[in-house]
Every structure is written in structure tokens, then in C-alpha cells.
Amino acid sequence: MNISLSNLASPVVNLTPAGSSSRTGGFAEAIGSAIGNVENAQSQAQSAASDLLLHGNGDVHTVALAAQSAELSLELFQQVRNKFVAAYQEIMKMPM
């Protein structure tokens, strides 16, 4: 059985945001962008709910989907944060 390694996809993923030419501030920008996305999803869910309750605009399904999307984005951000904190703690345990 011969397996050609040239046919396998590269497991390395470029984490640099598109259009970013410098590496300074990349992590801070990524975290700031993620926080902005979570806040945006939450504000959209809140505005959809208030539009439905106060003005009668929209429907229950749209509000439920917006709320679920906001909840999932927050949970994803929390998991990424937890993994980052765990990795940082592991690095700090390493002897120098």
C-alpha cells in the first residue's frame, strides 16, 4: 500500500486575517473582532426582540433564530477563551 504524501492537504492553516500585511497586533485584532462579532449578534437579537414586542414588526421565528445565534456565538467565544487560558497556564508551568 503506497500513500503519496503530496496528495494530502496541508494541515497548516493561515490565521492571519485577509488583507493584513503586518503581524503586529494580529492576536489583539482577532480577539477584538471576535468580541465585536459577539456584541453585534447580541445587539441584533435584542433589537429583533424589542421590534417584535414594542412595534409588532417581525415574527417569533426571526427573534428565536437571532437569540439562538447570539447564544451560540457567545458560547463559542467562551470556549475559545477557555482554551487560550488553559494554553497560557500550561506555558507558564514550563520550567525555564
Image (cartoon, rainbow, N blue to C red):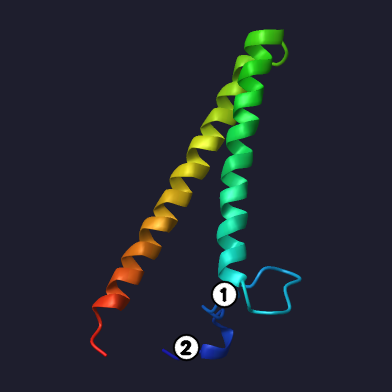
Provide residue 90's location: percent of width, then percent of height.
Answer: 28, 73
Label 2 Cα crowd, 10 Å radius (few <14 / some 14-19 / many 20+): few
Q: Which mark is residue 3?
A: 2
What kind of element bears circle 2?
A: loop
Residue 37 in view in this figure: yes
Q: Which mark is residue 59?
A: none
Q: Amino acid at mark 2?
A: Ile
Provide residue 70's location: percent of width, then percent of height.
Answer: 54, 36
Q: Amino acid at mark 1?
A: Val
Label 1 Cα crowd, 10 Å radius (few <14 / some 14-19 / many 20+): few
Please give left or right for residue 58 compared with residue 28 in the image.
Answer: right
Location of residue 54 (image quadrant):
top right
86 versus 63 height, above or below: below
Quadrant, the C terminus: bottom left
Q: Quickly name the residue at label 1.
A: 13
Q: Nearer the viewer, residue 24 or 44?
A: 24
Provide residue 41's location: percent of width, then percent of height.
Answer: 61, 38
Location of residue 32 (image quadrant):
bottom right
Residue at the image point whose x is 43% and y is 57% from the top: 80
Residue 62 in view in this figure: no
What kind of element bears circle 1?
A: loop
Residue at the image point whose x is 23% and y is 87% from the top: 95
Q: Earlier in the sequence, mark 1 or mark 2?
A: 2
Q: Nearer the viewer, residue 27 or 14?
A: 27
Residue at the image point whose x is 62% and y is 33% from the top: 43
13 versus 42 height, above or below: below
Task: Give the farthest residue toward the right.
Answer: 19
Location of residue 61 (image quadrant):
top right
Quadrant, the N terminus: bottom left
* Mark 1–mark 2 distance (CA, rounded to whole Å): 23 Å
52 versus 21 height, above or below: above
Number of callouts: 2
